[in-house]
Amino acid sequence: MNNEEPEWKGQLLQKIKERESAQIAGREEVASLVKENEALNKKLSRLKQFNLPDRSVQVPVEQAPAGISAQPAVAHPMYT
């Protein structure tokens, strides 16, 4: 029985080392994804500034210039 004991202990220690390595790799990947997410959020914030409603010019339907219809020329099948 004593001969088998070191074998299972060694296998257990090997599994623990593998799990610890996987855990470290997972943490590194999470940190990388967090940085990427923060960078994308900053970029999105900058892009949203260019698309603010008060900066766009909107013509109300009742004041549309002559010859411009508020209705589409052809009804799209998806919306009929």
Image: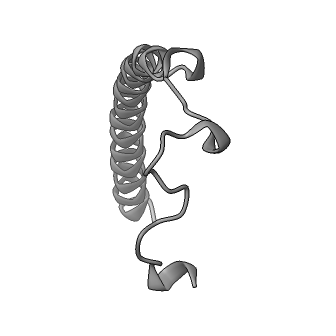
Q: Quadrant of the C terminus?
A: bottom right
Q: Position of residue 13 (x, y in %)?
A: 39, 45
- Residue 52 lies in what quarter of the image? top right
Indicate whether 16 appears above or below 56.
below
Outermost front residue: 66
Q: In front here: 52 or 33?
A: 52
At 42% from the left and 17% from the top, the residue drawn is: 50
Q: Position of residue 64 (x, y in %)?
A: 54, 40
The answer to whether residue 54 is left or right of residue 7 is: right
Q: Position of residue 40 (x, y in %)?
A: 38, 24
At 33% from the left and 35% from the top, the residue drawn is: 25
Q: Give the colour scheme of this rendering.
A: one colour
Q: In front here: 59 or 48?
A: 59
At 62% from the left and 44% from the top, the residue drawn is: 61
The answer to whether residue 7 is left or right of residue 80 is: left
Q: Position of residue 32 (x, y in %)?
A: 34, 25
Q: In front here: 28 or 49?
A: 49
- Residue 53 lies in what quarter of the image? top right
Outermost right residue: 62
Q: How many labels sit on residues?
A: 0
Indicate whether 68 appears above or below 47.
below
At 43% from the left and 24% from the top, the residue drawn is: 44
Indicate whether 17 appears above or below 12.
above
Q: In front here: 61 or 51?
A: 61
Indicate whether 23 appears above or below 38.
below
